Image: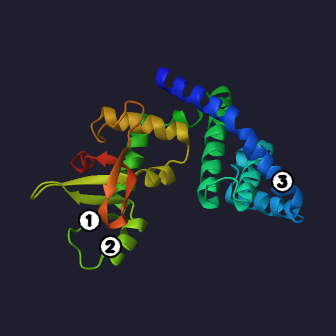
Amino acid sequence: MEERLQFVEKQEKLTQDYQGEAFRAYLAKRCADTRAEETLKKYVNQFLEAASLPEQFRWLGRMRRLFAVVYASAAQAIDYGILPWKRKATLKAGLACMTDAMDQLTANVSDNREGGGDRIKSDDTLVAEFKRRVEEAKFVRIERNSRKPYCTAKRLKKADGYIQATLPGRVRYLLRSKALERWFPNVTTRKHLSAVLRSRGILKAGRRADTSTRQIHIAPLKRRVSCYLLLRKRISE
C-alpha cells in the first residue's frame, strides 16, 4: 500500500507539472477543428457500441455515457497528436475501468437485495464450472524451432491457453487471463474464484501477492502474455 501511495502521489505531481501544457496544445487544435463535435459524437457512439449494459442494471447507462465522453475526448486528443496512445488500447482501458466500477456497484446492490449476488454460488459450484470450461478450452502446444512461425502465432492468438515445454519430457499449462475474463466477466466473482483455485492447488500463485497471473514470454508471439499457471492434473481430481 505504501508503494502504491507513493506511485499515485508521484503521478499527481507530474500531472500538475505537465498537464497544463498538454491542455493548451489540445485547446489550440480543438478550436481550429471545424468537425470536432462531429468527431466526438462518433467516438462516443463507438464506445457505447462496445460497452453493453447488464439487462437488470439499465440505470448504469448514465455512468456508461460519462465513460464514453472520457474515451471520446482521449481519442480526439490522440488524433491531434497530443496523447501518444493508440485508440484501440485506450478503448480497451476505458471499458476495463467502466466494467470494474460497474461490478463494484452491482455487487453492492446484489449484496443488499439477495445477500451476496454472484457469491451465492458455492465455491464447489464455481470450481466445477471452471473445470468444465478448462476441459472444453483450446490449449495450443508451443513448438520449438517451428518451420511455420506465422501459422503458429496465428493459432496461439486464438487459443485459450498454451502447453509449454519446460524440461525434457515435462510441460506446463498456461491459461490466458483473457480466457478466464471471458468465462467469468464479473470481477468480484473472478477474483474470488482465483483465490479458491489457488487454495485448492489448481492454480499456482502469481508473481505478486495481489495477483494470480504471471507475464509469460511467448516466443512465437514475440511478447509477454498474462497467464495463470494451471496444474492440469488437479482438474480431473
Of the image marks 1 and 3, the number of the one nearer the N terminus: 3
Task: Quadrant for residue 139, please give it.
Answer: bottom left
Picture residue at 35% right of the left edge, 58% below the top: 161
Given residues 34 and 198, the one toward you in this image is: 34
- Amino acid type, callout 2: Thr
Number of residues whose C-alpha sits closer than 10 Å to that of mark 3, classed few (under 14), some (14–19) or many (20 or more): few
From this viewpoint, which residue is outermost toward the left? 168
- Amino acid type, callout 3: Ala
Picture residue at 36% right of the left edge, 63% below the top: 222
Q: Is residue 24 left or right of residue 96?
A: right
Of the image marks 1 and 2, the number of the one nearer the N terminus: 1
Give coordinates of residue 9: x percent, y percent. 59, 26
Q: Which mark is residue 142?
A: 1
Q: Mark 3 touching mark 2, by CB under 8 A?
A: no
Of the image marks 3 and 2, the number of the one nearer the N terminus: 3
Number of residues whose C-alpha sits closer than 10 Å to that of mark 1, classed few (under 14), some (14–19) or many (20 or more): some
Q: In the picture, which quadrant includes the C terminus?
A: top left
Picture residue at 62% right of the left edge, 55% below the top: 84
Residue 235's place in the image compared with 136, above or below, is above
Q: Mark 1 touching mark 2, by CB under 8 A?
A: yes
- Amino acid type, callout 1: Ile
Picture residue at 42% right of the left edge, 41% below the top: 125
Spatial CA distance of label 1 from label 2 is 8 Å
Give coordinates of residue 6: x percent, y percent. 53, 24
